[in-house]
Image (tube, rainbow, N blue to C red):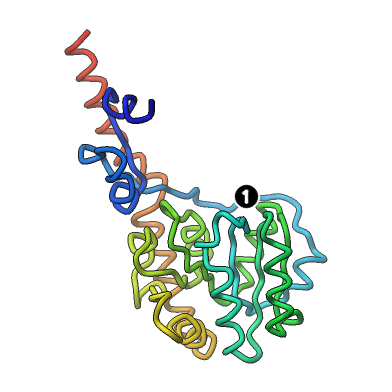
Amino acid sequence: MKRRALRRAALCLAISRYTVERARPFCDLSGAHVLPLALEERPPEGAVELDLISQAGTGFLLMVGRMAASERYKGHDEVLEALVRLPGARLVVAGEGDDRFRLQGRAAELGLQKRVLFTGFVSEATLAELYRRSAAFVLPSLGEGFGLVYLEAMRAGKPCIAARGSAAEEVVADGTTGFLVDREAAGALPDALGRLLAHPELARRMGEAGRQRWREQFSFARFQAGLRPLLAELALSAGRTA
């Protein structure tokens, strides 16, 4: 049914080139237009969970994403293992899911229970404050179709650590707005994280570059500018066949 719908669609949009490539074995998206996701100018407002924010403190590594047993490609285990090699570094993991308790147990096995805070579900306003207080954002996922959380971190002026071979390559500018790491390369993830933690000025510069990249390439204005001509052409085509 999905393939038939794609064949009959007058317009097909994809959020990343990565998505187009991943879909290729199942359907032909060669005619798809790639239109990246966008993020609003201001983070959501609302009540902030002050007790949680107090526990988190500042200067921590932040990871945001669902913790599902079916989505272990996100890299939670790899980040915990990287933290072992970064004495003194702290990690805040925001999100919920059926794999949370296993990950908490894994953190305890690694002796990280005092350095890792699992927040569970948090409000959008609380999440925005966590981004603001963090030192860097990390999500070495190998399965995101785009990864809106990278834009959230960039909007907050934070450098991002992501994985090569993923859609993040289209969002994170390696060496400019953060680092892309090879998850299979021993030491690559802790080395990248350690570099940002050890060099706050580098992290600040990368974060500012990320904020600028978000404004220039992933703003709603840019999204609308990309979508408008596609819709105009669609309307024109519909008029011809009416």
- Name which quarter of the figure residue 192 lies in: bottom left
Give coordinates of residue 114: x percent, y percent: 76, 82
Q: Position of residue 144 (x, y in %)?
A: 45, 55
Amino acid at the residue labelled 1: Pro
Label 1 Cα neighbours within 10 Å, binned few <14 / some 14-19 / many ≥20: few
Q: Nearer the viewer, residue 70 or 119?
A: 70
Rendering coords of residue 92 (x, y %): 66, 71
Tell me the quarter of the image containing the N terminus.
top left
In the image, 239 versus 221, the foreground residue is 239
Count numbered badges in the picture.
1
Is 159 placed left or right of 83 in the picture? Answer: left
Q: Is 142 situated left or right of 170 in this image? A: right
Q: Is residue 105 left or right of residue 165?
A: right
Does 228 sit above or below residue 235? Answer: below
The residue shown at (67%, 54%) is: 97
The residue at 44%/71% (across/down) is 208
Q: Position of residue 223 (x, y in %)?
A: 36, 43
Q: In this view, which residue lies farthest toward the top? A: 242
Residue 32 figure quarter: top left
Looking at this view, name the residue that lies furthest to the right: 51
Q: Residue at x 21, y 37 (%)?
A: 31
Residue at image coords 47%, 61%: 150
Q: Is residue 157 positioned above or below 44 on the image?
A: below
Name the quadrant of the C terminus.
top left
Which residue in the structure is indicated by mark 1?
Answer: 44
Q: Report the residue that reaches farthest toward the left.
A: 240
In the structure shown, which secondary structural element does the residue marked by tag 1 occupy?
Answer: loop
Whether residue 27 is situated above or below residue 39 in the rendered picture:
above
